[in-house]
Image: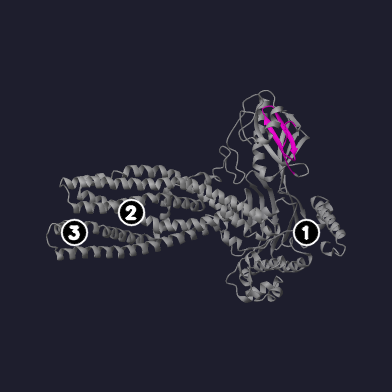
């Protein structure tokens, strides 16, 4: 959706241009547009809605590229009772145009267009109000982000787009002091050793002056060699070299140890912080990107601290000490030596700004390559099942090619900068030679002084060239530090309480008062009131998208309610420590997740200190003991990643055993038997009967027949409770539950007709 003063905005889809233009009247302007992607039969077909200053235009869906004038146009002139309303259900959104009680038109779309639809409605309302009042269009920039609900500024969310928009700053590296502070004495020791080793490396050129002027040049003039002086000078050269080696080894070793520990602490703190963030954060992130930040970015920072920063500090010390020695030997020659410095500093400043944003872009592009791997490798079975190897290879090639393109752009800049610095240093060395020879010819300096000067100059320019190269690695490290601190700076939307309340023994009474929740602008739960008694089993039923799983997530405090409250035993769950509260909840999901490890380790995941006897008791109660014993190594049998090697029913029973072992007071069953066959469901149901006994239970089930033991059924529709009661009461009302039950019964009858060998007893 765009606001514009021309009939064809720059971002307006080109494919519609020839279709729209003939239908515009005079100076009529398009102020907003929306391209929907579903037709009335929910087939994927595109259609177009336009809002002008005096009417709403609709262009019907098409199967192929539209030809000029080939499509009819519907128009809806603005009138007083005209209204656009948005609804969504089961992953499909609908946009309805009404006039009073009459529905004029309805358009459908996938929820990926939800944010664009809401913006289109807002712009339509502005144009309609302006048309009816005759006044100017009222504009503002306070629309909300569909992801986080933050205010949009120029159609962008400052919160969600912050990672991509803000370029990395070199000053970000100073924030690493938080991790370096515990090792400050080791760092001080390393710095002192660096100072000493740098000073030791500057001794040899100084000793070449007497070696040239007092030994070699007099010898060429006929004087005998003073062996004592030569012995002392050569001994000094050897001692300084040996001392520089020893000090260099010590400072490199100490600082390398410190940098590795800083890197390890950085990874640990980042990972621990990541675990504390709410599910909302992970919903907008890619696995490959997060793995790249914690892994490769922290490694890059570690290498920078252990190698490049050490070299940079050594270079700075070397340049400062060398400059001091040069000035003490001959000030004028020193001034000539330092002439290229301002030019090199200017080049570094220019290139740094280009590299700063470039390396940030490289990091983001590389994370796209990692994301392809993170998507494909865990889902390799699906890739092979649908024969999509070529497609995934094409995705990887495209991401890799994009990465190559961005790197080529940065390398083009860097490849010009580095040789330019080298050229300047070579020219500077040539100038020193010329000026030095001129001074020797005037007897202002000796050959020994010039030799020592040139030795220092070569080291000076070598270090200067090395310092110029630090620009690249510094910007890379700053980019990596920024991406890590983006995680550390993110505040969880489910915070720990400032003054926690501790409940010794939770009975399991759950109370919801006017509870509401919304994803950005989309309301999912609205004004929900519910009282659940200790030990009571509640069944949540409703169509897909009615808010059942969201309600469970709120009870587990994976998300916090937007309005109202949820209490446990009369205490708001926001006042309870998160880990302490969740330790009283057992969760059994439709798709159980098992970690790589043994069967016993997976069962004891919630209680790592459990004894083997406790693990076996939980497995027996979950009806898993028998099939576990049939495995090659019993409870020590390894489970592949995500439970590979076990059937769905076996994974589910291990998940139930895991929940049983922690003996929770509150039990959440989210479609626990939805993905298994009838026979397996019987086994799982027996295990669930053991699990449910004596616990407050909230169960979501697709098959209504599995909730026959529930004390009450809560029927949800679009986030609102529409009915509460047991099966018989709700059937007698012939309301929403009655219609759901009959719809399922018809489906079961149809299945039985297709499978006459099935008795249907389990669905009765």
Nearest to N terminus: mark 1 or mark 3:
3
> Which mark lies nearer to you, 1 or 2?
2
**Residue in front for this viewpoint, 426 or 748:** 426
Residue lying at the far left in this picture: please name it.
Answer: 223
Left-right relation of 364 to 117? left
> Which mark lies nearer to you, 1 or 3?
3
Please tell me whether residue 688 belongs to the stretch shown in magenta.
no
Q: Secondary structure at mark 3?
A: helix
Nearest to N terminus: mark 2 or mark 3:
3
How many residues crowd around disc 1 within 10 Å: few (fewer than 14), some, or many (20 or more)? Answer: some
> Real-space Cα distance between discs 2 and 3?
27 Å
Main secondary structure type of the part rendered in magenta:
strand
> Which mark lies nearer to you, 2 or 3?
3
Magenta span of residues: 44-69
Res. 703 mark: 1
Residue at image point 72% right, 66% down:
649
- Color encoding of the figure: one colour
Quarter placement of the C terminus: bottom right
**Residue in front for this viewpoint, 466 or 699:** 466
Task: Read off the residue under disc 3.
Answer: 211
Tell me: residue 570, above or below residue 21: below
Residue at image point 58% right, 56% down:
287
Tell me: residue 670, above or below residue 546: below
Tell me: residue 428, above or below residue 676: above
The quarter of the displayed image where residue 202 is located? bottom left
Res. 315 mark: 2
Asked if one can make out residue 339 in the rendered structure from this viewpoint, the answer is yes
């Amino acid at each position: 959706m765009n606001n514009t003063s021309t009939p064809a905005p720059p971002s307006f889809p080109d494919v519609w241009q020839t279709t729209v233009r003939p239908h515009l009247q005079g100076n009529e302007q398009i102020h907003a547009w929306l391209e929907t992607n579903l037709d009335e039969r929910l087939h994927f077909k595109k259609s177009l809605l336009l809002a002008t200053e005096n009417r709403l235009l609709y262009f019907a869906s098409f199967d192929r590229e539209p030809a000029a004038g080939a499509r009819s146009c519907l128009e809806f002139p603005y009138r007083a009772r005209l209204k656009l309303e948005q609804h969504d259900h089961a992953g499909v959104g609908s946009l309805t145009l009404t006039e009073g009680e009459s529905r004029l038109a309805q358009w459908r779309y996938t929820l990926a267009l939800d944010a664009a639809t809401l913006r289109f409605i807002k712009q339509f309302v502005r144009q309609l109000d302006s048309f009816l009042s005759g006044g100017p269009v009222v504009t503002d920039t306070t629309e909300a982000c569909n992801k986080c609900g933050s205010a949009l500024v120029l159609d962008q969310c400052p919160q969600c787009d912050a990672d991509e928009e803000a370029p990395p700053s070199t000053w970000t590296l100073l924030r690493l002091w938080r991790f370096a502070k515990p090792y400050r004495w080791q760092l001080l020791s390393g710095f002192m050793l660096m100072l000493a080793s740098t000073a030791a490396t500057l001794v040899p050129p100084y000793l070449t002056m007497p070696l040239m002027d007092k030994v070699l040049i007099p010898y060429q003039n006929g004087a005998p060699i003073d062996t004592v002086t030569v012995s002392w000078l050569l001994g000094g050269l050897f001692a300084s070299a040996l001392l520089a080696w020893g000090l260099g080894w010590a400072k490199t070793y100490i600082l390398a140890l410190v940098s590795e520990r800083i890197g390890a602490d950085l990874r640990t703190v980042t990972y621990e912080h990541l675990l504390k963030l709410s599910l909302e954060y992970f919903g907008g992130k890619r696995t490959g990107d997060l793995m790249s930040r914690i892994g490769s970015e922290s490694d890059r920072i570690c290498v920078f601290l252990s190698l490049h920063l050490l070299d940079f500090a050594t270079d700075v010390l070397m340049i400062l000490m060398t400059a001091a020695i040069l000035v003490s030997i001959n000030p004028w020659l020193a001034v000539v030596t330092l002439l290229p410095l301002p030019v090199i500093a200017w080049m570094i400043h220019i290139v740094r700004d280009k590299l700063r944003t470039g390396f940030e872009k490289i990091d983001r592009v590389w994370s796209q390559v990692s994301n392809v791997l993170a998507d494909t490798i865990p889902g390799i079975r699906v890739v092979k099942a649908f024969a999509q190897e070529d497609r995934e290879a094409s995705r990887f090639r495209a991401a890799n090619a994009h990465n190559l393109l961005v790197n080529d752009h940065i390398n083009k800049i860097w490849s010009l900068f580095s040789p330019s610095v080298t050229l300047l240093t070579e020219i500077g060395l040539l100038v020193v030679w010329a000026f030095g020879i001129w001074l020797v010819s005037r007897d202002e300096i000796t050959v020994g002084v010039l030799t020592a000067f040139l030795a220092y100059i070569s080291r000076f320019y070598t270090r200067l060239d090395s310092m110029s190269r630090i620009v690249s690695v510094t910007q890379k490290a700053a980019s990596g530090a920024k991406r890590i601190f983006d995680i550390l700076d993110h505040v969880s939307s489910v915070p720990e309480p400032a003054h926690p309340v501790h409940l010794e023994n939770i009975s399991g009474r759950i109370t919801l008062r006017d509870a509401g929740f919304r994803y950005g602008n989309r309301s999912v739960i609205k004004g929900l009131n519910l009282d659940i008694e200790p030990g009571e089993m509640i069944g949540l039923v409703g169509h897909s998208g009615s808010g059942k799983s969201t309600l469970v997530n709120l009870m587990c405090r994976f998300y916090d309610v937007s309005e109202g409250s949820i209490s446990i035993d009369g205490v708001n769950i926001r006042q309870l420590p998160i880990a302490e509260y969740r330790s009283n909840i057992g969760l059994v999901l439709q798709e159980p997740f098992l970690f790589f490890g043994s069967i016993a380790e997976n069962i004891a995941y919630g209680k790592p200190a459990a004894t083997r006897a406790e693990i076996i008791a939980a497995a027996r109660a979950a009806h898993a003991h028998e099939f576990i014993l049939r495995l090659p190594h019993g409870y020590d049998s390894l489970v592949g990643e995500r439970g590979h090697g076990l059937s769905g029913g076996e994974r589910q029973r291990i998940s139930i055993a895991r929940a049983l072992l922690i003996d929770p007071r509150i039990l959440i069953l989210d479609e626990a038997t939805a993905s298994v066959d009838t026979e397996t469901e019987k086994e799982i149901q027996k295990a669930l009967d053991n699990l449910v006994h004596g616990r407050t239970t909230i169960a979501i089930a697709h098959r209504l027949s599995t909730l026959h033991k529930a004390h009450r059924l809560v029927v949800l529709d679009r986030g609102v409770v529409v009915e509460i009661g047991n099966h018989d009461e709700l059937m007698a009302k012939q309301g929403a539950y009655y219609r759901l039950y009959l719809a399922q019964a018809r489906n079961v009858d149809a299945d039985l007709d297709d499978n006459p060998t099935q008795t249907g007893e389990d669905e009765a």
